Image: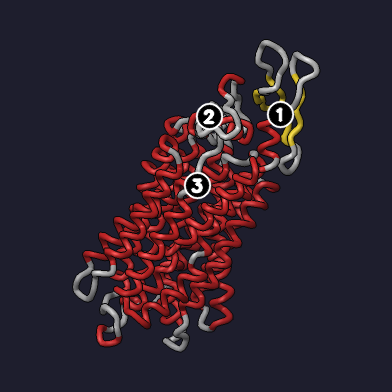
């Protein structure tokens, strides 16, 4: 049972109403200690989506992530960079072409910690706007790179865009879930983060067209300008709910004196809803286990995502030159994994769903070495994309479940550094193995072993007994 404050109480003393969430967003109120009370209007507001504003925020977050997801289309650019200079490439090795991608992942993950704190304190619109500017500017700076001059793309894509990814990503999900009741956390998280996974569906073919028409530099420049305009518009829509709506949505206690009138601009960052601070979180056994599981899952998924176009070229002997199409199709499965896993985990539990996802990804890693045709790569990349996407919905929802929504931005930002660790080592490992052996086979087997280990750890991953639920 949770409590919320009722503004319409006719008694002199503030009244607490007992709140029951019973399927969907339907809310029942039972008065405590008084008779003839009216239901809290804030609960009804949550039930109705507060004028559908919550859905606007959620889909604006999805749209923002659709632009930031250019990260997942890197293999299309990397493949062009490894081509000979006389063929429009930069003549890079696979390892060299992975460096901007790896740097962006590392900076993205590290930025999630200050970005989470920034959006908790100043609001998601500020963080999202900063992310939009840095991402677009970083892409433009990258356009000045070329053969023998990697510095602009390392600074632009790796540092600037990587920082932008972190700021934008940290703003979108926390803002959206604060508009909805706890039983919808998985679904809303899945909707918002699906944009990041779905982005290659259009960026991969668009990027390939721009690369063919304008070269690597021109492609970066055009995408940078376009992303800046679109993401700045979307960032304006990503806001926290009024305090009262946030308090009801996360099941917290909002004193009647703190309930703002409808239309108030006070944000949910002021909410008194319960949530664990980061020190409590990192001291728990559950955090350590989740960190390891997230690292291994990210390593395996980003290893494939970062090299997919090149993997297909290598394993088909160059017969299939449409790797960008598989990058795009993988995006559909990536987004589907985020949506479906979020929905299923609301029903069957986060950890149980995570275990199934990790084992599925391990199995497909074992068959990846034998793939050499279009049908096989379509299925294989689809399973990897679905499993990886599912993890990106399950881990944030689990953090909200285990440690509450109040400090979710910072708490998830800290756990998200595990994604950065896995994302930096996975593509580097795959690139070095491929450069040394001419094959990715050993990398697949290492990833499969790590995924099985992560799945085993889920059997002992439990919610901290004293955590303040969201």
The reply to whether residue 239 is visible in this rendering is yes
Residue at the location (54% across, 77% down)? Answer: 377
Q: Is residue 62 above or below residue 75?
A: above
Q: Quadrant of the C terminus?
A: top right
The disc, 1 or 2, on the residue closer to the chain's N-terminal end is 1
Residue 82, given in percent of the width and then of the height, sits at 31, 78
Q: Quadrant of residue 309?
A: bottom left
Determine whether the residue tagged by mark 3 lies in a helix, strand or loop: loop
Residue denoted by label 2? 271
Residue 112, given in percent of the width and then of the height, sits at 40, 46
Residue at the location (64% across, 40% down)? Answer: 50
Determine whether the residue tagged by mark 1 lies in a helix, strand or loop: strand
- Residue 456 appears left or right of 318: right
> Cα distance, mark 1 to mark 2?
17 Å
> Cα distance, mark 3 to mark 1?
27 Å
Residue denoted by label 1? 19
- Is label 3 or label 1 in front? 3
- Residue 297 appears left or right of 161: right
The disc, 2 or 3, on the residue closer to the chain's N-terminal end is 3
Q: Nearer the viewer, residue 187 or 450?
A: 187
Looking at this rendering, what residue extends furthest in the top direction?
A: 12
- Is label 2 or label 3 in front? 3
Q: Is residue 20 above or below residue 393?
A: above
Q: Quadrant of the N terminus?
A: top right
Residue at the location (66% across, 38% down)? Answer: 46
Q: Is residue 216 above or below residue 172?
A: below
Give neighbour class at mark 3: few <14, some 14-19, many 20+ (Cα, 10 Å): many
> Cα distance, mark 2 to mark 3?
17 Å
Residue 30, given in percent of the width and then of the height, sits at 77, 24
Q: Nearer the viewer, residue 447 or 99?
A: 99
Residue denoted by label 3? 238
Give neighbour class at mark 1: few <14, some 14-19, many 20+ (Cα, 10 Å): many
């Amino acid at each position: 049972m949770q409590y919320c404050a009722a503004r319409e109480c006719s008694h002199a003393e503030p009244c607490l109403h007992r709140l029951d969430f019973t399927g969907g967003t339907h809310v029942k109120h039972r008065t405590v200690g008084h008779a003839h009370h009216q239901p809290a209007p804030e609960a009804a507001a949550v039930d109705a989506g507060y004028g559908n504003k919550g859905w606007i925020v959620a889909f604006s977050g999805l749209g923002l992530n659709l632009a930031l997801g250019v990260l997942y289309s890197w293999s299309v650019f990397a493949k062009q960079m490894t081509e000979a200079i006389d063929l429009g490439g930069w003549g890079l090795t696979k390892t060299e072409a992975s460096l901007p991608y790896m740097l962006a992942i590392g900076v993205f993950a590290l930025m999630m910690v200050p970005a989470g704190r920034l959006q908790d304190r100043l609001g998601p619109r500020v963080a999202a706007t900063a992310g939009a500017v840095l991402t677009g500017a970083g892409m433009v700076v990258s356009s000045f790179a070329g053969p023998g001059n990697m510095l602009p793309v390392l600074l632009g894509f790796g540092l600037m865009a990587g920082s932008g990814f972190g700021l934008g990503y940290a703003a979108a999900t926390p803002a959206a879930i604060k508009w909805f009741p706890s039983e919808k956390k998985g679904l809303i998280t899945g909707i918002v983060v699906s944009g990041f996974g779905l982005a290659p569906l259009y960026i991969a073919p668009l990027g390939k067209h721009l690369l063919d028409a304008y070269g690597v530099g021109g492609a970066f420049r055009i995408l940078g300008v376009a992303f800046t305009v679109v993401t700045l518009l979307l960032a304006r829509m990503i806001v926290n709910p009024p305090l009262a709506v946030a308090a009801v949505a996360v099941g917290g206690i909002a004193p009647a004196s703190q309930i703002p009138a409808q239309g108030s601009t006070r944000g949910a960052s002021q909410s008194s809803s319960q949530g664990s601070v980061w020190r409590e979180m990192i001291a728990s056994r559950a955090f350590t286990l989740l960190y390891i599981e997230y690292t291994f899952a990210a390593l395996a998924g980003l290893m494939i995502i970062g090299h997919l176009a090149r993997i297909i070229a290598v394993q088909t002997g160059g017969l299939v030159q449409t790797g960008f199409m598989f990058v795009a199709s993988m995006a559909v499965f990536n987004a589907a994994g985020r949506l479906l896993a979020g929905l299923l985990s609301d029903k069957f539990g986060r950890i149980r769903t995570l275990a199934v996802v990790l084992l599925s990804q391990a199995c497909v890693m074992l068959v990846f070495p034998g793939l050499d045709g279009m049908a096989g790569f379509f299925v294989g990349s689809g399973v990897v994309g679905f499993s990886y996407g599912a993890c990106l919905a399950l881990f944030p929802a689990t953090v909200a479940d285990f440690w509450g929504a109040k400090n979710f931005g910072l708490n998830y930002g800290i756990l998200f550094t595990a994604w950065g660790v896995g994302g930096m080592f996975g593509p580097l490992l795959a690139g070095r193995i491929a450069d040394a052996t001419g094959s990715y086979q050993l990398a697949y087997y290492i990833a499969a072993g790590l995924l099985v280990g992560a799945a085993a750890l889920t059997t002992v991953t439990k919610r901290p007994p004293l955590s303040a639920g969201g």
